[in-house]
């Protein structure tokens, strides 16, 4: 009874819906327009800070009334809030996959289990998945990692709260201890982060991301909502409003400019953003400030109350929709608008018919609810909802039953085999060249002068010129896929390729190649498959190569990704800026030939590799 009364008397801070709106819009736009909303991923630590504050503030109110915490009741409330929407999304997505996108069936049982039991972030870490590999990451459940971090906190926090209140007692000391834990989490992120490498481990880890939630929790001990007064001096109100607006401006600027690949993000940047998010929460919670009122309007209220569903359904909608669109990059804005409408529409249905009804449902009255359910007419909203749920659940169970584990298709096997073999050969060739530069020649280092065996459709003059040309090929998995053919045509070619490579990580590698005398006067570049880049990043890369070298840059064919045209347009612009840059138009040459590619429509298959190598060679030697 006390718990129910406490919930009814609790002040609902409407401005938090505004904060949630800003956070969820940032996350969605980050996924749809990563080059515009570069820091939209920072919406997640904002969610964490709000969550930490609200949960702890609620526990403090309960403790004041009862001097204990109903841990079981806490868990039940959290499950009623989180599980209906999550389970509905998992069931609906699984049902869709089994009928319309069976390539996503692989490991479905493990994905769903890790999501339902909230260890998805660690499951993804241990499986070696990357949040930042924009090309190969295709799971509609990638974003569940953040829900796992929150749920793991919910599991431990009420117990830790009881310990702190019983043995530490003083709110100021508790605040200090929690902030010390937050600082420790931030330091751990910095220690475990390796510059230039994939930051998924520190991005996903509960230990390295908990600081945002802890800051919100710490705030509730020194800034409880139930002790904040509405009537405060004008100077205090002005100060609070100014600090709140400044925090909001900092967060919005971070959304626009703090890209996920900046080392600063992991060396304290995300920690600082979380501090500003916590300050924004503090000012919004204060009834004496105006920020709560400024962040309250019908639009923000609608988005804020549905923000959980919007977050849940964003990835499934994007992955499912974009898989069916063959010209995504030709109409990015139109398709993005359609995706947003779908996300909002499905989220509204989920909120109205699943999250809200089940969130308010008292499960101790389940038997009475079942009897009442069958007494009602058949054509009612609850019965239609239940029927749809049963049908989708049957389809989802079928999906779980037929889903393979760790399956690799024939195409994927062939591609992996090619890339592994070509990378091994490329590394061997680099080692031989380094030995040659150091005056250590080996028998295997003798360069071939025989004509290439493959049917590369090259004239004798072109073959002869290619055999004498010193050239370095630098790129991603597409370069590696075709490296064998390129090295057959250009026997002196040095290949440096890496799966998932992007331009923003490439400048230090180019500088290293130059230092080791492996960067030849002709440089073939194949970057852009995994994401677009800015002009500043391009300039930095070209400066590292140097103006005296000739650069041949292969444009991209990535029809299923929104950045294809953006990359190719940037290359055309840069061609006018750099006299030593030649753009090889692989896109227009190959775009009408799906038969040249594996199922991903990006990596050339066995026949496509010949076409790729021949076309590039002709452009270089002409």
Image (cartoon, rainbow, N blue to C red):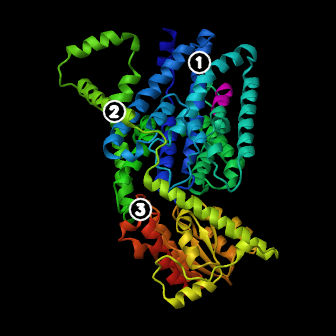
Q: How far separated are the C-alphas under marks 2 and 3?
A: 29 Å
Q: Which residues are magenta?
A: 216-222
Task: Tell which of 494 and 269 is nearer to you.
Answer: 494
Label 1 SS = helix
Callout 3–callout 1 Cβ contact below 8 Å: no
Q: Which residue has dot 2 on it?
A: 398
Q: Is residue 50 left or right of residue 557?
A: right
> Given this view, does label 2 or label 1 mark the residue nearer the observer?
2
Q: Which residue has dot 1 on it?
A: 61
For residue 95, above or below residue 478: above
For residue 604, above or below residue 321: below
> Given this view, does label 3 or label 1 mark the residue nearer the observer?
3
Specify the label residue 601 is tagged with: 3
Q: Position of residue 532 (x, y in %)?
A: 53, 64
Residue 564 visible in image? yes
Task: Tell which of 285 and 488 is nearer to you.
Answer: 488
Q: Position of residue 284 (x, y in %)?
A: 57, 36
* Neighbourhood count class around disc 1 (C-alpha, 10 Å): few under 14, some 14–19, many 20 upward: some
Q: Is residue 218 magenta?
A: yes
Label 3 SS = loop
């Amino acid at each position: 009874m006390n718990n129910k009364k406490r919930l009814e008397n609790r002040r609902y801070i409407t401005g938090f819906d505004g904060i949630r709106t800003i956070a969820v819009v940032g996350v969605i736009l980050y996924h749809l327009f990563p080059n515009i909303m570069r820091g939209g991923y920072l919406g997640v630590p904002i969610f964490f800070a709000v969550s930490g504050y609200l949960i702890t503030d609620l526990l403090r109110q309960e403790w004041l009334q009862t001097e204990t915490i109903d841990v079981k009741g806490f868990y039940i409330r959290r499950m009623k809030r989180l599980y209906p929407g999550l389970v509905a999304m998992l069931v609906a997505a699984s049902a869709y996959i089994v009928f319309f996108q069976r390539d996503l069936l692989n490991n479905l049982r493990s994905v769903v289990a890790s999501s339902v039991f909230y260890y998805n972030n660690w499951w993804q870490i241990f499986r070696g998945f990357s949040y930042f590999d924009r090309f190969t990451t295709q799971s509609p459940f990638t974003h569940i990692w953040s829900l796992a971090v929150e749920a793991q906190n919910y599991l431990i926090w009420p117990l830790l709260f009881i310990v702190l209140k019983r043995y530490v007692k003083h709110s100021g000391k508790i605040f200090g201890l929690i902030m010390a834990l937050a600082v420790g989490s931030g330091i751990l992120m910095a220690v475990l982060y390796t510059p230039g490498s994939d930051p998924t481990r520190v991005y996903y880890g509960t230990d390295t991301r908990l600081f945002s939630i802890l800051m919100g929790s710490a705030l509730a001990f020194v800034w409880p909502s139930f002790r904040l007064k509405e009537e405060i001096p004008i100077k205090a109100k002005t100060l609070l409003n100014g600090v709140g607006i400044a925090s909001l401006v900092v967060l919005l600027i971070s959304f626009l400019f703090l890209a996920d690949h900046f080392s600063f993000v992991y060396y304290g940047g995300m920690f600082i953003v979380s501090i500003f998010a916590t300050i924004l929460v503090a000012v919004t919670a204060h009834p004496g400030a105006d920020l709560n009122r400024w962040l309250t309007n019908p639009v923000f209220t609608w988005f804020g109350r549905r923000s959980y569903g919007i977050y849940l359904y964003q990835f499934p909608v994007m992955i499912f929709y974009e898989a069916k669109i063959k010209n995504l990059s030709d109409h990015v804005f139109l398709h993005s608008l359609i995706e947003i409408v779908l996300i909002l529409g499905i989220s509204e249905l989920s909120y109205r018919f699943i999250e809200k009804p089940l969130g308010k449902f008292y499960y101790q009255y389940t038997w009475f609810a079942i009897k009442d359910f069958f007494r009602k007419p058949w054509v009612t909203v609850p019965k239609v909802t239940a029927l749809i749920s049963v049908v989708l659940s049957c389809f989802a169970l079928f999906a779980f039953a037929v889903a393979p584990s760790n399956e690799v298709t024939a195409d994927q096997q062939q591609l992996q085999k090619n890339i592994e073999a070509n990378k091994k050969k490329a590394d061997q060739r680099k080692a031989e060249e380094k030995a040659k530069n150091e005056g250590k020649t080996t028998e295997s280092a003798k360069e071939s002068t025989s004509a290439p065996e493959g049917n590369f459709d090259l004239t004798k003059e072109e073959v002869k010129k290619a055999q004498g040309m010193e050239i370095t090929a630098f790129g991603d998995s597409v370069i590696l896929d075709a490296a064998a053919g390129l090295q057959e045509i250009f026997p002196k070619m040095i290949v440096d390729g890496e799966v998932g490579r992007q331009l923003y990580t490439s400048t230090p590698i180019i500088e290293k190649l130059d230092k080791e005398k492996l960067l030849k006067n002709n440089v073939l570049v194949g970057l852009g498959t995994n994401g677009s880049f800015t002009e500043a990043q391009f300039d930095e890369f070209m400066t590292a190569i140097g103006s005296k070298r000739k650069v041949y840059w292969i444009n991209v064919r990535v029809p299923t990704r929104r950045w294809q045209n953006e990359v190719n347009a940037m290359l055309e612009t840069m061609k006018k800026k750099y006299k030593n840059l030649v753009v090889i138009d692989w896109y227009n040459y190959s775009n009408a030939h799906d038969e040249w590619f594996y199922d991903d429509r990006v990596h050339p298959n066995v026949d496509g590799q010949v076409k790729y190598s021949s076309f590039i060679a002709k452009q270089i030697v002409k």
